[in-house]
Amino acid sequence: MNLLESFRSGLQAILANRLRSGLTMLGIMIGVAAVIVLVAFGQGASNAVTGSIEGLGTNLITVFPGAAGGSQSDASLAVKDLTVDDAVALNDQVLSPDISAAAPTKRARVTCTFGALSHSTAMVGSWPAYFEISNSAVSEGGYFTNADEVDGRRVAVIGKTVADDLFTDTDPIGKEMICDGVPFTVLGVLVEKGASGFGDQDDTIIAPLTTVRNHLTGNGSLDTIAVQASSSQTQAQAQVQLSSVLDDRHGVDVETRDYQIFNQASLLATVNQAVGIFTALLGAVAGISLLVGGIGITNIMLVSVTERTREIGIRKAIGASRRVILLQFLIESTVLSLIGAFFGLVLAFLVTRVEVAGIQPTIVPASVLGAFAISVGIGLFFGSYPANRAASLRPIEALRHE
Amino acid sequence: MIPVLDLVDITKVYGDGDSIVRALDGVSLTVNTGDYLAIMGASGSGKSTLMNIIGALDVATAGQYHLDGIDINTLDEDALSIVRNRKIGFIFQSFNLIPRTTALANVELPLSYRGVKRGERRERAKEALAAVGLSDRMHHRPNELSGGQQQRVAVARALVAQPSLLLADEPTGNLDSRATADVLKLLDEMHDQGRTIVMITHETEVAQHADRVIVLMDGRISEDRLNR
C-alpha cells in the first residue's frame, strides 16, 4: 500500500466521522491560528515601532540639554545650554569624521492661519541639513536654503497634515500663512510619513532657525542638536566623537555631563528585543493551545482504535502487517492534524487582515511553516500511542471484539 | 507432493498453573491440494482454536504445522501476516467486511497489502466479484448488501489473491436457507475448480458438501470419515 493510497484511506476514515473529526481539527485549527496570529501581531508591533523610530531620521543621534538622571540634583554643576556653536563644532570633519551632519533645533508651539482656516502645531526651527537628518523630503515645492537661514527669511516647509488642514484644496506652494502673527511663505510640502507610536509625524512645520528665534522663541537654549552618523555601522564611533567634542566644549566628563544623548540604533535594538521577548511569550502561550489540540487527537484516535478493533482484526487476518496498521493510523492522525492546520492558516489569514490598536499584523512566513511542521509533528507524536495500540492488537482477539 | 496442510501432534494450552486448559490435545491432520474438508464439533471441542492455528492467526503451544511446506510455528507476527496474505483466504461467519468501504475496495484489500498495482488490483477484484455474481453490486457498501451478498463479497475477497487454502469458519451460520444454498454452491464450484477448502461448521447438512469430515471432541479428533 503506497503512501498516496494510505492518505486517501486516512481521509476516508476522517470523513466517515465528520462531526468528531471536525471537533478534533478545531483544536489544532485554533492552536495553529493562535500561533500564527500572535506571532503576526508581534511582528506587526515590531514593524510599527521600528517604522516610527526610523521615521525620525536616518542614523539619528539626538543631543538634549540637561544632565541625565540623579546627577541633575547636584546644584554645584552649572548646566550649559546647547548652542549653535556646539552644532557648528560637531560639523567639524576633523574632530568628528563619522558625523555627516549636525543641525540645531528649536521648537515653537504655533497657531497658523490661512484665510478662515487655522491649525495648531509645532514649528521646528533648524538648518537645511535637518531635512536630510530627519528623513524629511519634500513631495512638492522645495527646501529653504542656507541663505534663507542666515538672513532669517520668513519661509517654511509644511507637513502633509498641516497642508491638508490649512490649505485643503488650494496649492500651498508660494502661499503666505500667518503663524502667531508672523507671516511665512510656504516653500514645500513634506512627503507623508504616517501616524506612529510617536504621534502624527506629518503634523509639523520646518522653518529656518534664525527666523524662529528672531520672531517666535528668542535666543534661549536649543531644544536639541540632531546629529546624523555617516552610516549605521559608524553610529557608535559617531557617538563617541560627539561626546568628546561636547565634553571638551562644556568642560565636563562622563560623570558631570550636562547633556544627554539619544541614539536611534540603541533604542531600536532595545525596543526590538523587548518586542521579541513579548512575541516569543505570546507564541509560547499559543503553543500551549496547540498542545491541547494534540491531546485531543490522541483522545479521538484512541476512541477510533477501540471502535475499529474488529476492522483492525479483519485487516490483520487478511494480511496487514503491524507496519501497515501503524502507518494507517499515523497517517490518519497526521491528515487530521494537517487539515486542522490548513483551516487554522485560513483563519489566521482572515484575522490578520484586521488592524488592532493601530498595529497591522504581519504574517511571518517562518511561523506558517513552523505551525505546519509542528502540526505534522503533533499528528505523528500524538497519534503514535493509539497507532501503536492498534498495531499491536492480536488478530484473534481483535476479530472476537464486538 | 507437499500437502497443503500438515499438522503433527498440535497442542494448544491456555492459561497456566491450576487453571490450565488444553484446547487442542495432539491433533494430527493432513490436507492435500484440492481437498474439501469439513471440521465439525460441539462448542468447546476446540474447533475454533484449530481454525485459528490453521489460519495462522495463532501459534500452537506444541507440535508441528506446515502450510504449503512452510513451518508456521517458527514465524514471528509479521511473517505470519505475510503467510495469511499469500496462502490463506478467510471466510468468516459474520462476513467481516470493512464497513463504509465498497465491495470492490474490500476485495482489493488483500492485493493492496501484497503490493499489487492499483490498475491490476482493480481488474482482478472486478473479476473475482464477477465470479461470485456481484458485478452489479461492486460499488455498494456492506450495509447496502444482504447477508448472502456480503458473504459472496467475502468469498470474492478470499479468492482474489489466489490463496493455497480457503478457510471458512461457519460460513453459513448467519445466513438464511437460500443464501446458505448460494454460498455452498459457490464453495462447491471452487472445489470443482481444484481449490483446497477447509470449512468449520456444526451443521451436518453443510458438512455434507465436503469430501471428508473430521469431528473434534475435547481437543482430539474423534472421527475422520470420507463422504460419498
Image (tube, grey):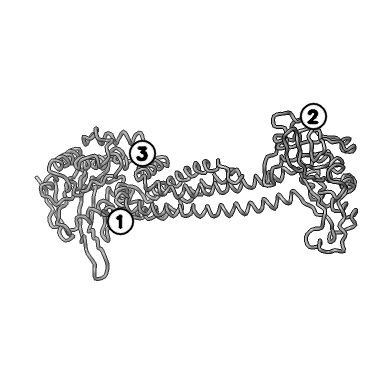
Q: Which mark is in front, 3 or 1?
A: 3
Instruction: Identify the image quadrant of residue A204.
Output: top right
Residue B85 visible from this viewpoint: yes
| Residue at the image position 22 percent from the left and 40 percent from the top | B145
The three-letter amino acid code for the residue at tag 2 is Gly
| Helix, strand or loop under label 2 | loop
Q: Is residue A193 above or below residue B14?
A: above
Left or right of A136? Residue A378 is left
Number of labels in the image equals: 3
The chain holding disc 1 is B
| Helix, strand or loop under label 3 | loop
| Disc 3 with disc 1 on a shared chain | yes
Question: Looking at the image, is mark 3 or mark 1 earlier in the sequence?
Answer: 1
Looking at this view, name the residue that lies furthest to the bottom.
B18
Q: Within 10 Å of the Cα at label 3, are there few (<14), some (14-19), or many (20+) other Cα atoms?
A: some
| Residue at the image position 84 percent from the left and 48 percent from the top | A222
- The residue wearing badge 3 is B116
Cα separation between marks 1 and 2: 104 Å
Which quarter of the figure is the N terminus of chain A placed in? top left
The image's mark for residue B73 is 1
- The residue wearing badge 2 is A174
